[in-house]
Image (cartoon, grey):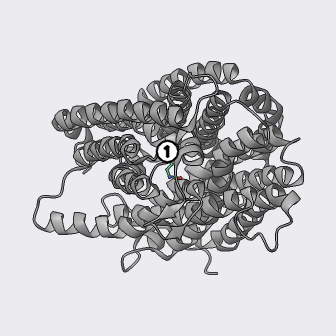
Amino acid sequence: MQQNLTLDQIQNFEGKYPKQLWYLFFSEMWERFCFYGMRGMLTFFMINQLFMDEKVANLQYGATQAFVYAFTFIGGLFADKILGFRKSLFWGGLLMITGSCILAVDPKQFFFLGISFNIIGTGFFKPNISTMVGALYKNGDVRRDAGFSLFYSGINVGALLGGYACIAIGKGTFLTSIVPPHLTWNVAFALAAIVMTISLITFTYTRRSMGPIGLSPFEAANGENAENSKKWYEYVVYLGALAVVPVIMKMVANTQYTDWFMYIIGPFSLLYLFYEMTKHTAAEVKKLIAALLFILFSVVFWAIFEQAGGSLSIFAANNVGDKLFGAITLDPNGVNNAANSLFVIIFAPLLGLIWIAMAKKKIEPNTVVKFGLGFLFLGFAFYTFYATRFFADLRGMTSLDIFTLAYFIVTLGELCLSPIGLSIMTKLSPTRLQGIMMGMWFLASAYGQYVAGLFGASIVSDVENATAMDKLISYTEGYKQFALYAIIAGVILIVISPLMRKLMQDVK
Ligand code: GLN
């Protein structure tokens, strides 16, 4: 593995992608396998193994996911100030492996303990690997968006494999010949631990090729062998992370604490950002305000999109058939977890080509309009989830084909917003705030997840001993509402796009 590259050598790469992007691609791919594998199991496991009520499971799911993404803000902050991206990633990976191993040993008994390790671990890992991708490019390098698109495909290869395999092993519908029936959930969580280990090995083995990218601020200032006097800052972060595990455990288990946490972390992060703004020039501040507006809109997007892991997972289990095109038998929960990723992998490169073709004709929509389009697609997709009710039989079972079609449309929306969001965060943030801004981008996902849980719980049928038909009606009615919210947000964004572009100045 080549060492001692300078930043210039890395950023002046030839061709479409820097080779380091592939290393980050694979580390992130395996990390997302672990994350989405686990996410796909949460709601189902809570209802079927921990015997929680559907409403409680929705809220609890929202709470775990909210915490996961809220910790990305904290992970980004500590990376910028103390650890640097590399150490943050390594530490996050270790915590995720620990959490998954705990769950593999006894998922029922140690459920919240294992989940808490994973929450904190993801917080250290997730935002910082995305920021490292941004650091591979010089300001103004037009190849940056393509790099993030490729990286986003990596995310989804992991999400696809993990999302399908873990829940299907857990439910006992996949690899049945080798997994003993009484250990299916243990094996499913153990698989998450194994792949996370592969992620960490990939990262450790390739990190030397990153030159100065991701060194801690102390190392960056004093060379890689920074004086040891600052080491104790690092140890405080590591110990602090371990010390909050029991706190997170309590807070996730009791969703009322999650409410408090969410009331505090958002305003705190905003205040902190405003304080940081006072240290920057007016032009930089304008860009940060634009970034903040993107972040705020994305909350609405994720609140609707993230029904995927909550209410749509319940909907898939209760109301969706298992035949695709009338012939192929698939686990509807597996499809719920994996269809979106499969479509991202197939259509991300295609959409990239469409943007390039439009750019050549000078008709490529700008980033703000793309965001708006993302919302419109999301709206159409949720109208399609609503429309599944018209394809249901008398038992309330609806078509897997229409359900999958809705996921296709959701994905088009996601591709107009999510990879572009990552890229625009790295373009609009000054170097010193890269980690924090990426953390704030994901913090928006935290609020999205949190609201997603509330939305999801609000559409659970109130009928006592609800039949599958009652559930179908009440869930799909909710999806119609969400569709309307998405369309409204999309229209607002497109209307305010000239104002946003003024704030963004030279950034496209
Ligand atoms: N699916 C993407 C990922 O896992 C985006 C998730 C999000 O920001 N909510 O990275």
Give the mark count.
1
Question: In which image quadrant can residue 347 be found?
Answer: bottom left
Q: Nearer the viewer, residue 96 or 144?
A: 96
Left or right: where 132 falls relative to 261:
left
Q: Residue at x 81, y 59 (%)?
A: 184
**Relative to residue 117, is residue 56 drawn left or right?**
left
As displayed, is residue 353 above or below residue 475?
below
Position of 440 with respect to 412 (left or right) is: right
* Amino acid on which disc 1 is placed: Met
Q: Is residue 459 visible?
A: yes
Q: Position of residue 352 (x, y in %)?
A: 30, 66
Query: Which residue does the image show at 53% across and 28% down from the upper left?
Result: 269
Identify the residue at horizontal 67%, vertical 19% (top origin): 256
Q: Position of residue 495 (x, y in %)?
A: 17, 34
Location of residue 252 with respect to 166 vertically, above or below: above
**Residue 116 vs residue 429, the one in the foreground:** 116
Q: Which residue is mark 1?
A: 438
What percent of the width, then of the height, locates residue 124? Answer: 66, 47
Q: Quadrant of the N terminus?
A: bottom right
